[in-house]
């Protein structure tokens, strides 16, 4: 077992099994956040197992050798805490927030649930029904569905283009044994990071985790921690295309964009500034032009998603179907303008301020501090200090943003639309 100091108040211990424990002491709080992060997500699934990670997210709270589903939830809620989980394309997180005095309980319950779930056949069938309802509900939310359609338009059948939840066609036939096999093969100690932040003591957290792990499938022999996910050069994006899904909705939902950059790309800080200037807030170009000046859309924004080996950049707008063509023309015009002329010095200052402010203000609670620790370990393999990160943002120049804009915004873009339109309603732009 090896313990090291990463930053002031931040310590990291690697257990012999390869499981990592990272904590941050925040002495002025009376709460603690605990997360168990597994470096396995929907992109690690075969087509036949699409949705397995999300299925597990549901099942791991349904009972262990020590606790029933009711006991897992009631023990945490009895002390005013909360538990939840979420699945992404590259990792899955199970977390709890409790009073600092109840952290030992949270560790025992959460580690037990993640490390030693029973996956009873009856629970698999119950949760299968819940997940199918969740997928159906998602399809009834066109503002969410359009982003999934956009990702598929970029990545096609690659795992990054598939739904995290899976589809009815993949979830319905998935057997309990298949899910259990995925769980036992992929949820290994080297892939797990236990992160905690709040009023805590690192050595105590390590002791509690080791005690909770004892005798579980994650209490294994010597192994090295898994390295951050390597870039896969085989990721291929499709040729730009328009995908229109007909829905009898009162509003048109549009996403225009294309492939972006990976989280290892040094230009990501300039990308953050560019994203904020384009559509990151009420002062952004797209918001001012489309909503404030013309009143054509209630919601319009840009966003960037970054993975180990690729990324997405998109602009979303929700508007009246009759205004969709005009809104799309305005988005394209603004993207072309920024690609050709860059941004202004004032916009550079404002964009930097938005990036820095959102990052620092996002670290005001124990949950976000815990997430920062885990994501840094899982995705990057190190923990960038706040001052260093702010310095990287401050170092972004007009030329940096201009180069990113010229690269990303001059390409042919894909378009995803959900609304009352026929397939050929939007000609290629």
Image: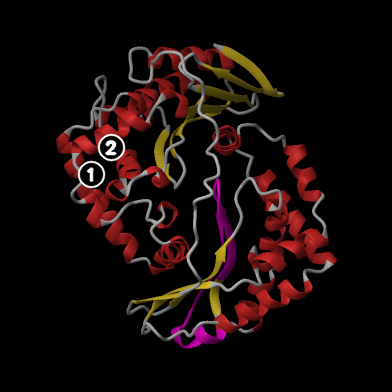
Q: Quadrant of the N terminus?
A: top right
Earlier along the polypeptide chain: callout 2 or callout 1? 2
Q: Nearer the viewer, residue 385 or 270?
A: 270
Q: Are marks 2 and 1 in contact (CB under 8 Å)?
A: yes
Query: Which residue occupies 59% across, 59% down?
Result: 260
Q: From this view, report whether residue 77 is shown above or below residue 16.
A: below
Secondary-structure class at tag 2: helix
Which mark is drawn over residue 59?
A: 2
Is 117 magenta? The answer is: no
Secondary-structure class at tag 1: helix
Q: From this view, report whether residue 171 is shown above or below residue 95.
A: below
In the displayed structure, does residue 116 sit left or right of residue 303?
Answer: left
Query: Which residue occupies 19% across, 51% down?
Result: 172
Residue ranking furthest to the right = 345
Is 317 magenta? The answer is: yes
Query: Which residue occupies 30% across, 24% down?
Result: 116
Residue identified by numbered label 1:
127
Q: Quadrant of the C terminus?
A: bottom right
Q: From this view, report whether residue 180 is shown above or below residue 275.
A: above
Q: Give coordinates of residue 358: x percent, y percent.
A: 67, 50
Q: Is residue 64 visible?
A: yes
Stretch in magenta:
300-326
Q: Give coordinates of residue 330: x percent, y percent.
A: 62, 82
Q: From this view, report whether residue 82 is shown above or below residue 423.
A: above
Q: CA distance from mark 2 to mark 1?
A: 7 Å
Q: Is residue 60 visible?
A: no
């Amino acid at each position: 077992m090896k313990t090291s100091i990463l930053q002031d108040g931040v310590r990291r211990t690697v257990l012999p099994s390869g499981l990592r424990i990272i904590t941050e002491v925040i002495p002025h709080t009376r709460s603690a956040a605990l997360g168990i992060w597994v470096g396995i997500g929907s992109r690690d699934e075969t087509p036949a197992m699409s949705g397995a990670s999300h299925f597990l997210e549901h099942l791991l709270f349904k009972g262990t050798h020590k606790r029933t589903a009711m006991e897992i939830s009631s023990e945490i809620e009895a002390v005013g805490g909360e538990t939840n989980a979420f699945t992404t394309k590259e990792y899955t997180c199970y977390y709890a927030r409790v009073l600092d005095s109840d952290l030992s309980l949270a560790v025992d319950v959460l580690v037990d649930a993640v490390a030693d779930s029973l996956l009873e056949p009856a629970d698999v069938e119950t949760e299968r029904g819940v997940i199918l309802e969740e997928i159906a509900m998602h399809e009834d939310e066109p503002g969410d569905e359009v982003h999934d359609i956009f990702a598929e338009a970029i990545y096609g059948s690659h795992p990054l283009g598939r739904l995290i939840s899976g589809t009815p066609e993949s979830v319905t036939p998935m057997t309990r044994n298949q899910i259990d096999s995925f769980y036992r093969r992929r949820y290994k100690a080297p892939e797990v990071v236990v992160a905690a932040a709040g009023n805590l003591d690192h050595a105590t957290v390590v002791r509690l985790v080791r005690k909770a792990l004892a005798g579980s499938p994650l209490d294994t022999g010597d192994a090295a921690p898994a390295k951050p996910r390597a870039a896969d050069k085989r990721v291929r994006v499709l040729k730009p295309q328009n995908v229109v899904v007909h829905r009898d909705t009162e509003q048109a939902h549009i996403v225009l964009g294309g492939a972006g950059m990976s989280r290892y790309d040094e230009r990501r800080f300039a990308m953050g500034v560019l994203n904020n200037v384009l559509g990151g807030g009420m002062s952004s170009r797209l918001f001012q032009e489309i909503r404030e000046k013309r009143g054509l859309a209630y919601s319009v924004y840009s966003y960037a998603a970054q993975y180990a080996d690729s990324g997405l950049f998109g602009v979303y707008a929700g508007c009246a179907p009759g205004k969709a063509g005009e809104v799309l023309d305005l988005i394209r015009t603004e993207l072309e303008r920024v690609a050709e002329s860059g941004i202004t010095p004032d916009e550079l200052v404002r964009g930097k301020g938005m990036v820095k402010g959102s990052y620092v203000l996002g670290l005001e609670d124990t949950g976000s501090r815990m997430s920062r620790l885990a994501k840094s370990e899982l995705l990057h393999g190190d923990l960038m200090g706040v001052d260093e990160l702010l310095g990287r943002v401050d170092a972004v120049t007009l030329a940096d943003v201009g180069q990113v804009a010229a690269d990303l915004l001059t390409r042919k873009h894909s378009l995803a639309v959900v609304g009352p339109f026929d397939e050929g309603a939007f000609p290629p732009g």
